[in-house]
């Protein structure tokens, strides 16, 4: 059988969990994930895990955070003056806000980590940064 390789469009069913078993994403009940291998459309460890599989193959891959969403970057945790946040926006720890980056119009989602009288501590890291991931993969099709 043909093995999946860079440049192929693959269709994959998956279940993603953290090392403690907590489910964070799954294709169950949905169409399989379709992407081009080697194109950077998915995290490196996922891409590498599918490479070499044949249609019908199933396997589990353990992806260290450096091949997933990277380690937590402390430079992406910022103190933002509370006076610059509109009063009608709820500031609950664990809640999210959308921030506009200056100049390019890009919006990034940040998580509220702490609220003080003067500052809101915001984390712009990907929610899975610093996490090692486990994916159960099933290659459904290669195009």
Image (tube, rainbow, N blue to C red):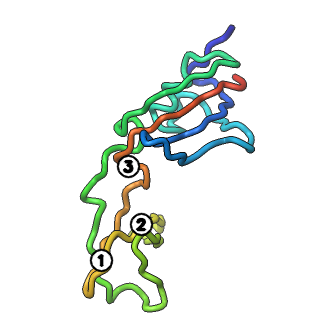
User: Is residue 104 shown above or below 28?
Assistant: below
**In which quarter of the view is residue 137 placed?**
top right
- Give the number of marks: 3
Contact? badges 3 and 2 (CB < 8 Å)? no
Q: Position of residue 4 (x, y in %)?
A: 61, 18
Question: Could you say which disc has been placed on residue 61 in the image?
Answer: none
User: Is residue 90 shown above or below 4?
Assistant: below
Q: According to the image, label 1 marks what residue?
A: 80
Q: CA distance from mark 2 to mark 1?
A: 11 Å
Q: CA distance from mark 3 to mark 2?
A: 13 Å
Q: Position of residue 67 (x, y in %)?
A: 39, 35
Q: Name which of mark 3 and mark 2 comes first in the sequence.
A: 2
Q: According to the image, label 3 marks what residue?
A: 129
Compare residues 34 and 93 and report the one nearer the observer.
93
**Which residue is at the far bottom?**
87
Left or right of 77: which side holds 124? right
Compare residues 18 and 138 and report the one nearer the observer.
18
Q: Position of residue 22 (x, y in %)?
A: 50, 46
Q: Judge depth for marks 3 and 1 and give the one in front.
A: 3
Q: According to the image, label 2 marks what residue?
A: 110
Q: CA distance from mark 3 to mark 1?
A: 21 Å
Measuring 32% from the left and 85% from the top, which residue is drawn there? 82
Binning the other alpha carbons within 10 Å of mark 2 as few (below 14), some (14 to 19) or many (20 upward) gives many
């Amino acid at each position: 059988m043909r093995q999946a390789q860079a440049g192929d469009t693959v269709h994959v069913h998956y279940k993603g969990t953290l090392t403690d078993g907590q489910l964070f994403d799954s294709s169950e009940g949905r169409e399989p994930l379709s992407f081009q291998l080697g194109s950077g459309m998915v995290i490196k460890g996922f891409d590498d895990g599918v490479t070499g599989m044949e249609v019908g193959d199933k396997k589990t891959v353990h992806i260290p955070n450096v091949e997933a969403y990277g380690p937590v970057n402390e430079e992406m945790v910022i103190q933002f003056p509370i006076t610059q946040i509109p009063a009608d926006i709820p500031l609950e720890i664990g809640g999210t806000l959308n921030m506009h980056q200056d100049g390019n119009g890009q919006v990034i989602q940040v998580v509220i980590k702490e609220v003080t009288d003067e500052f809101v501590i915001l984390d712009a890291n990907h929610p899975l940064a610093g996490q090692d991931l486990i994916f159960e993969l099933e290659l459904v099709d290669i195009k």
